[in-house]
Image (cartoon, rainbow, N blue to C red):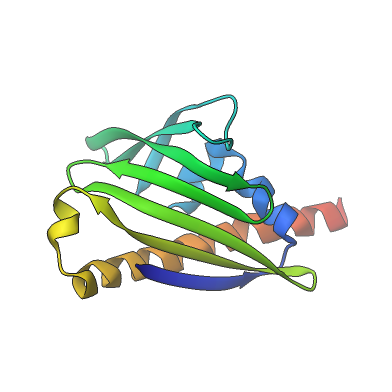
Amino acid sequence: MSTNTRRIRATPEQVWDVLADGWLYPLWVVGASRMREVDGHWPEVGARLHHSVGTWPLLLDDDTEVLEAVPGHRLVLHARAWPTGAAGVTIRLEAVGTETDVTIEEDAASGPARLVPKPLRDLPLAWRNVESLRRLAFIAERRVAGTRTG
């Protein structure tokens, strides 16, 4: 399982607010191109984000489902992205004063990607999730800065 952590200058509740807005998913998740639909009860267990991956005109429609949600603390997802398969993703939020350590753990759960040796799977996942965490930080920290000045 690939694991990446980044400290974000926002509280766990403020980071959770970004995670809880499913329409923001393609802004911070590397590889997600667009949202087609967000279930009204996102991010509750069983809710799905209906997204596309890839670059136009080579877009694939797929979805991500919530397996577990503890608001402000943990979000466990089953992310589909055929033809490569599906991934298990766990996002953990840990308060550090007024900031948050956000950890993403991800690994192939099924499909052809599962056949790739773990060290070769982890490297691109680590690169992708470093950037995803950077983007998540940009959104959460800008929202916090906006509430301070606005």
Could you say which quadrant of the image residue 6 lies in? bottom right
Residue 75 lies, in percent from the top left, at 55, 50
User: Foreground: 70 or 21?
Assistant: 70
Asked whether the viewer can see residue 125, the reply is: yes
Asked whether the viewer can see residue 30, the reply is: no
Q: Relative to 133, does residue 54 appear above or below in the rendering?
A: above
Q: Relative to 131, does residue 63 appear above or below in the rendering?
A: above
**In the image, what residue occupies the spot 46% across and 32% down?**
48
**In the image, what residue occupies the spot 66% across and 67% down?**
94
Question: How many discs mark residues in the rendered view?
Answer: 0
Residue 143 is left or right of residue 79, and the answer is: right
Residue 73 is left or right of residue 105, and the answer is: right
Residue 119 lies, in percent from the top left, at 22, 75
Could you say which quadrant of the image residue 53 lies in? top left
Residue 141 is left or right of residue 24, and the answer is: right
**In the image, what residue occupies the spot 71% across and 59% down?**
12
**In the image, what residue occupies the spot 52% across and 26% down?**
39
User: Foreground: 149 or 61?
Assistant: 61
For the N terminus, give its image quadrant. Answer: bottom left
Could you say which quadrant of the image residue 120 lies in? bottom left
Residue 19 lies, in percent from the top left, at 59, 47
Residue 13 lies, in percent from the top left, at 74, 53
Q: Relative to 134, does residue 19 appear above or below in the rendering?
A: above
